[in-house]
Image: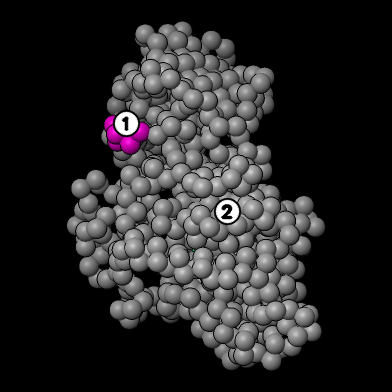
Amino acid sequence: MTTIPAPARLIPASARVIPAPARLIPAPARLDPVQGCFTFTGATPLTADPALARAAAWLRESLTPATGLPLPEGPGGVELRMAEGLGPEEYRLTATEESVLIEAATPAGAFYGAQTLRQLLDPAAFRAGRTGNRTWSVPAVTISDAPRYGWRGCLIDVARHFLPKHDLLRYIDLLAAHKLNVLHLHLTDDQGWRLEIRKYPKLTEAGSWRRESPLGARRHRRFDGRPHGGHYSQDDIREIVSYAADRFVTIVPEIDLPGHTQAAIAAYPELGNLGTPLDVRTEWGISENVLNVADATIAFFTDVLEEVLELFPGQYVCVGGDEVPKTQWNESVPAKERIRELGLRDADELQTWFMRHFTDFLLARGRTPLGWDELMEGGLPPGITVASWRGTTCTALAARAGHDVIVSPFAETYLDFRQAESEQEPVPIGSVTSLSAVHAFDPIPAGLTEPERSRILGAQAALWTEHIDSPRLLDYMAFPRLSAFAEAVWSGERDFEDFLARLAVHEKRLDALGVEYRPAAGPHPWQQRPDAPGHPRTRAEIDGQLATWTANLRS
Ligand code: ACM
């Protein structure tokens, strides 16, 4: 995943006309329609090179229930074939009146070809069962396609509101259907610890639930009086990781350190600075309760990461590092003692010292640590890949310092931000992040030098869930913006009007999948949250916030 794929080839406009029935999302790099169509029958066979068997199995498992087509093994119908000279996720799809050929150099490439084939069919192919007799056909076409970025991610915050396993598996399918390949799982935060750790059972026994949650933005001080909780057992995680791998989605687990840890401190008070018991946090916002810097705390989280490494085989593990108030460290005798002993400048450098135990540990195990851009404040730990959420300045600084970067600028890719100006938007927070803005998002910000650009591995959208308390609301906030985001990271050129025309068909696919996306005209009455007032801000306010952060960074 660390290799950056070559940019998609430039496509002559004439080659990008997508036949009306298909209307693919994300748009492929090149598509040439041909006369005619390929029609499936009950006898149409499916075969694959042994190396591509996983993609073929997925294709059969997803098409047969919806279409009733048995797709028996054999030559002469749909074929997945290994081909030399294609990129790591590239595929070619050739549909004629006689056959459908998907060529790829890797299983992932074949899988994306298979996903495209599903989109070439009627949207009813996205259902889980049959709705009646119909003729299944795909337009004759040749498609050559490859992603613009190797890292096409989505963060889901399962800490603020737990996402039950069944719904998480469904999201993995939704990511894969959009050719997204990274699920960044934000597993721990002040308001909940969601991952079973065998050595420290209280992390989930005590840390995975809270007494109640805020109703709406923090400033309104409304609470629902209702306990919230849930966690994934280690077998749940093994299942989720394996399910994702079968869909070419890598899970990047996040254990957020040393801030966003109040749930862990509530379970094990000796991890904190105050020596007094704390509750799992019942408010949103940034908690001042951060980890202490004792050797025992470092050992504790090294043990936690040991179990994380057993469970998550992917290259990247996120260790957080965002939003760490230094109030408690500035007042703590042991923290001040550490700063003095180590000859550090301040608590920001203490944070980097603390984080290096974990980043060095991961590097020694052959993994790559990922951390939020605030880690720059005390100096980026060597070998860390930076998740840059605070804009271009952070991206450029991290890249210039020689680090790989995943970009996830909050004003453009945080999908918990409201989708329109209207007061009817459920729990309106942040500035408006419209569908067109997400579609126009350019993962490589303007103004970067060539060496800086070359450090950008890709981008992530983020579904933070303070105000998303159910899978239904998650659908509303994610879609169709995540479909637009998928195009921003997969496709080269972009045309919003053309995207909207394709979205009209794509929404039928989302309907078939049971995705409760936001209607273009705004929320249905039952998608509104008059009980949970938000805190909408203007883009100028958000930009002002960003300017303050980056000014601090430069000073
Ligand atoms: C973040 O939004 N705190 C990474």
In the image, 550 versus 85, the foreground residue is 550
Query: Is residue 87 highlighted in magenta?
Result: no
User: Does 210 sit left or right of 435 as displayed?
Assistant: right
- Residue plotted at (73% across, 78% down): 344
Residue 143 visible? The answer is yes
Q: Where is mark 1, residue-wise?
A: 498
Q: Secondary structure at mark 1?
A: helix
Quadrant hosting residue 50: top right
Q: Secondary structure at mark 2?
A: helix
In this view, 248 is above or below 35: below
N-terminal of the two: label 1 or label 2? 2
In the image, 167 versus 74, the foreground residue is 167
The alpha-carbon separation of the residues under discs 1 and 2 comes to 32 Å
Query: Is residue 496 highlighted in magenta?
Result: yes
Residue range highlighted in magenta = 495-501
What is the x, y in percent for residue 483? Answer: 39, 41
What is the x, y in percent for residue 79? Answer: 55, 17
Q: Mark 2: few, some, or many residues within 10 Å (few <14, many ≥20)?
A: many
Q: Which mark is residue 396?
A: 2
What is the x, y in percent for residue 391? Answer: 49, 57
Point out the image quarter for the N terminus.
Answer: top right
